[in-house]
């Protein structure tokens, strides 16, 4: 018996794996889903182009799980992009995640679309400004910078900007990433000249893998939320809300 205890004590302990996390990104025209363990991508899949809906998204999740060789019950955590972005896309992504996660008890991370988009830019010293086309010659934008190994909000506050207003608020050197480059890129280039770098699509497009990376970090910090509390972060109000309230954008609280 003593020999057996010594052998067990000497045997290596099995490493505890990070939870298997399902991430959903539906803020734009190319929704995607991904499975991750911590920072390791297990599998990723994009659904068909066009306005996202529940029918293409659910089969994409099913195909993703089959590719990874696991069932939905094996998923231990969830992350979803909550906005800004397409009103329809955000609603579908959040509703789909709620349907999958409700009753599971699995932790859920609400991830900002602009933060996930900023991770698509090359890493460097220059500030990063994530820009999404908000239509009407405006962009959703927010600034970020690398602090050690973490990409943190910095500089430009998250908001809705016209091209000239955004260009006037950029630092002398920065990286613009996202499909909003088509809206504000010319004004930014005129203001910054060679100090500007741009990362348009396809690289400059939000992806589920970055949503998963940020979601895993949010959950590691214990900042997950109850799935029932998930709500979209639109920034811009719907037209009916604008007419009712006279306000074009949401308050800081959403």
Image (tube, rainbow, N blue to C red):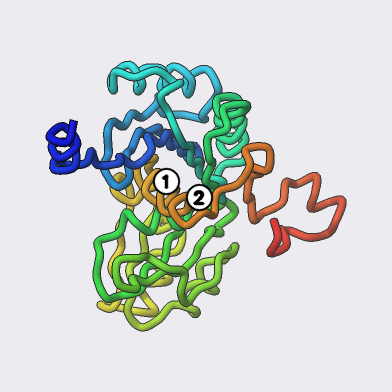
Secondary structure beneath dot 2 equals strand
Place of residue 155 in the rendered image (x, y in percent of width and height, measured from the top left): 47, 77
Would residue 84 appear left or right of 249 to someone viewing this image?
left
Place of residue 162 in the rendered image (x, y in percent of width and height, measured from the top left): 56, 66
Place of residue 175 in the rendered image (x, y in percent of width and height, measured from the top left): 33, 68
Regarding residue 179, the answer to whether it shows in the image is no
The local crowd at label 2, few if under 14, some if 14 to 19, many if 20 or more residues have their Cα within 10 Å, is many
Identify the residue at image location x=66%, y=54%.
236
Q: Which quadrant, please, contains the N terminus? A: top left
Q: Which mark is residue 211?
A: 1
Decide: is 237 above or below 79: below
Q: Tell me, yes or no, whether the two marked residues, 1 and 2, touch with CB atoms within 8 Å.
A: yes
Residue pushed farthest bottom? 172
Identify the residue at image location x=32%, y=54%.
120
Q: Residue 111 carries which label?
A: 2
Depth check, front residue: 78 or 14: 14
The image quadrant that residue 230 belongs to is top right
Regarding residue 212, the answer to whether it shows in the image is yes
Residue pushed farthest front? 1
Q: Distance between the residues labelled 1 and 2?
A: 6 Å
Depth check, front residue: 152 or 131: 152
Identify the residue at image location x=47%, y=57%.
221
The local crowd at label 1, few if under 14, some if 14 to 19, many if 20 or more residues have their Cα within 10 Å, is many
């Amino acid at each position: 018996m003593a020999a057996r205890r010594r052998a067990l004590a000497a045997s290596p302990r099995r490493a505890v794996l990070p939870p298997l996390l399902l991430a959903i990104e539906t803020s734009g025209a190319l929704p995607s889903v991904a499975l991750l363990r911590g920072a390791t991508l297990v599998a990723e899949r994009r659904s068909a182009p066009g306005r996202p809906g529940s029918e293409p998204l659910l089969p994409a999740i099913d195909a993703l799980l089959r590719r990874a060789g696991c069932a939905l019950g094996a998923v231990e955590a969830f992350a979803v992009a909550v906005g800004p972005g397409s009103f329809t896309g955000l609603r579908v992504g959040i509703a789909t995640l709620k349907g999958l996660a409700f009753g599971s008890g699995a932790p859920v991370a609400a991830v900002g679309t602009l933060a996930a988009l900023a991770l698509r830019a090359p890493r460097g010293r220059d500030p990063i400004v994530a820009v999404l086309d908000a239509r009407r010659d405006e962009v959703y934008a927010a600034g970020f910078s690398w602090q050690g190994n973490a990409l943190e909000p910095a500089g430009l506050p998250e908001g809705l900007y016209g091209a000239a207003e955004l260009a006037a608020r950029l630092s002398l050197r920065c990286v613009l990433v996202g499909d909003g480059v088509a809206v504000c890129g010319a004004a930014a280039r005129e203001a910054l000249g060679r100090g500007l770098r741009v990362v348009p699509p396809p690289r400059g497009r939000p992806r589920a893998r970055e949503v998963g990376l940020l979601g895993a970090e949010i959950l590691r910090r214990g900042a997950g939320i109850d799935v029932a509390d998930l709500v979209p972060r639109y920034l811009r109000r719907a037209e009916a809300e604008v007419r009712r309230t006279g306000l074009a954008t949401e308050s800081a609280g959403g």
